[in-house]
Image: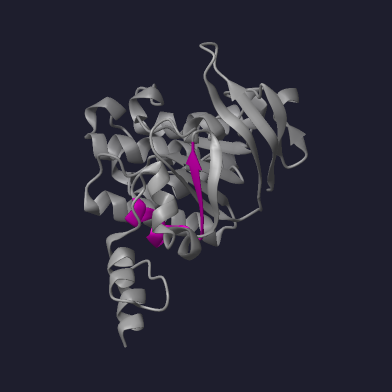
Amino acid sequence: MKIEINDLRFTYPTGLEALQGISLTIEAGEQVAIVGQNGAGKTTLVRHFNGLLQPSSGSVLIGEWDTKKHSVAKLASRVGYVFQNPDEQLFSKDVGTEIRFGPRNLGYSKEKIDELVTRALSLTELSDKTDTNPYDLSPTWRKMAALASVIAMDTPIVIFDEPTTGQDAVNVARIANVIAELRKEGKTVITITHDIDFCAENFDRVIALSNGKILLDGSARDVLGQEEILAQTYVDPPQLTRLGKRLGLKETVRNQDEFLKALK
């Protein structure tokens, strides 16, 4: 499902203009990472996608829906949002109930709910934790429970806000696997991240924001190769990308496989 943003501006009640004329299109099925320093406008931008924030001016279209004309509850059928802090999202007595809440609230049949919940539990490796209170889980598994609760809603667009923050390498790999599966299903996946290596490994397109404006927007390889421009928003390219530049490699490399291939 396409997202179209036209001259989006947003000013907080304090007078801070957090978004200053953002225009972009995200096509159905794209995998997009949004990067930039704290205060660049990343979270402010994506919270317009599900109606948590409304434009001061300009417009956001989710498919043919103008977000100003639809409620957050209505937009939840199209945009799933995984918060950075799972404690802001989880509220049920056990993991199974938590994951069933979203699809049940969207009015799916019992058969479809069962199917979606089983799939979400399998993808996040939570099948053996359905009777556990989410707050009895470790922070790592609480993150997966929050993620599963959104996956189970089967929305065409899924947003991850800093998915790897505070996660160990094993759970980062789990999250990457979930994103890969969503890609196979044709979902649009958008992430806000400071984890530039995770961004390089898992996302095709990178949008860099600075002071509420788009600084760069293009393929991950093109954007991550522009070290001097990225520095304006305090983003460093992945270590292997920087090393490749220092070694004079002709192509921008994003990961170990590309680095070794370029060396040959």
Q: Measuring from the top left, give residue 228's x and y in whole percent.
A: 40, 55
Give the residue displayed 37% in from the left and 66% down from the top. Answer: 254
Left or right, 12 with reference to 161: right
Left or right, 150 with reference to 197: right
Q: Measuring from the top left, give residue 123's x and y in whole percent.
A: 40, 52
The vertical placement of 171 against 79, above or below, is below
Give the residue displayed 44% in from the left and 34% down from the top. Answer: 99
Is residue 48 visible to the viewer in this orientation of the structure? Answer: no
Is residue 43 visible to the viewer in this orientation of the structure? Answer: yes
Name of the residue lying farthest toward the top: 13
The vertical placement of 264 against 219, above or below, is below
Q: Measuring from the top left, give residue 205's x and y in whole percent.
A: 52, 57
Name of the residue lying farthest toward the right: 64
The vertical placement of 124 against 254, above or below, is above
Give the residue displayed 66% in from the left and 53% down from the top. Answer: 27
Q: What stretch is highlighted in magenta?
A: 196-210
Colour style of the rendered protein structure: one colour
Give the residue displayed 33% in from the left and 37% down from the top. Answer: 143
**Location of residue 233 by image quarter:** top left
- Viewer-closest of 245 and 253: 245
- Viewer-closest of 28 and 256: 256
Left or right, 92 with reference to 30: left
Q: Does the stretch in magenta take in 89? A: no
